[in-house]
Image: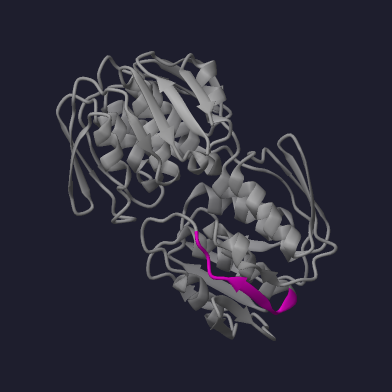
Amino acid sequence: MDKLRITGGRPLEGTVRISGAKNAALPVMAATLLTPGLHTLRNVPRLRDTRTFARVLETLGARIAFEGDRMTIDTHGVNAVEAPYELVKTMRASIYVLGPLLARFGQSRVSLPGGCAWGPRPVNLHLAGLQAMGAKLEIEHGYIVGRGVKLKGVRFGFDVVSVGATVQLLMAAVLAEGTTVLENVALEPDVTALGEVLVACGARIEGLGSPRLTIRGVGSLRPVDATIIPDRIEAATFAAAAAMTGGTVRLEGVIPDHFEASLRKLEEAGCRIRRAADAAEVSGPRRPKAVEVVTQPFPGFPTDMQAQMIAVCAVASGSSLIEDTIYLDRFTHVPELARLGASIELQGNVAVVKGVERLSGAQVMATDLRASASLVIAALAAEGQSVIDRIYHLDRGYEALENKLAALGARVERVN
């Protein structure tokens, strides 16, 4: 099993190009199931998750080819409706195929998902929305099964904001009969980007970027031809790494508005940030200042940056408070950061971080994707050598992370 060996204490300096967003690529890949054709996606990150999702599509009959960051998906031959447990258990986003299969074929057999070990992440909102649209769904032997489904437009409000459920119902509604109104939808850029892709394919969607979407069903769509938006969480992670190490990193190929909440919080912590249309330059302070953070749905501070911000606060002057209101038990990185010398006390879903002057290298274990990133940036700032185990989590969401860090001057290597 691969590990990362990092010798810390060196500021990051230079320019890094941010990859396409995994959380934007996966829904667009699922949307190719809505219509037969040859689909083209560009700026697709080379990640474990995008490769796993490609295998899911292939089990349904799609033919997929990769050329650099360009992916072509041929869905002419899609004729199966079962997404098997062996693949779906490894990645929760595999459930995105459910809505497109029901919309195009009127049937599905999709395994209940797996994925990250932290937090209850039920699919009840996905199922409730599809059932409101007329889908008769049963849970049979761990699979979500739909037969003879004819989706119809409906007015449906989400009890809580859910990116996954918004994406699911948006894809299902574009081919449903009649008009669907979705209320209290997620506003994340990944959702808006998917909607824009669907509109370019012939879907009729109003309200993108607002809490209410109106979707008028159409009879068919054109094949997808899209460029995936940049990964705002990867960009914010590199910004946090600059803050921790006191370096200056220029992020290229980004949309600063997409991670503005993270940039503002890093400015509050003492960073100097210059924004451009497609770039941002982050200069870290000699030592960060303590901050208070509360995670919120977009455009608020993202839960996917909670772990990285705790790492920054671990070396800040003063005490910081980080509250996660999205996933209340997403703190498995805390004991591992403590092994590096961080002083963190958990009080329910609030982390009280008492900043120390320096961290020290240690052997630590990654527990999920963003926890892994927090350990990496903490190790970059620590004195001495750290070894981070189970980095397959990183490979799910960060493309060539060690190569990008090395290009910025970090002493990092992947070892088996």
Q: Vertically, is 154 above or below 207?
A: below
Q: Position of residue 284 (x, y in %)?
A: 34, 19
> Is 187 displayed left or right of 105 in the figure?
left
Q: Residue at x 42, y 22 (%)?
A: 6
Task: Report whether 179 appears left or right of 310.
Answer: right
Residue 333 lies in quadrant: top left
> Could one spot residue 198 in this view of the protein?
no
Colour pattern? one colour
From this viewpoint, is residue 118 visible? yes
Residue pictured at 38% horizontal, 22% vertical: 380
Question: Where 234 falls versus 284 (above or below)?
Answer: below
Foreground residue, 128 or 84?
Answer: 84
Quadrant the C terminus occupies = top right
Expressed as whole percent of the image width and height from the top left, the position of residue 26 reads 61, 52
Residue at 60% across / 82% down in the picture?
135
Q: Position of residue 293 (x, y in %)?
A: 26, 41
Image quarter for residue 71? top right
Name which residue lies at 37% across and 47% down. Answer: 303
Toward the viewer: 48 or 137? 48
- Between 377 and 42, the residue placed more toward the observer is 377
**Which range of residues does the magenta coloring cover?**
105-114
Is residue 178 magenta-colored?
Answer: no
Residue 173 % position (x, y) = 62, 70
Answer whether residue 107 is magenta in the image. Answer: yes
- Figure label count: 0
Q: Is residue 389 left or right of residue 415?
A: left
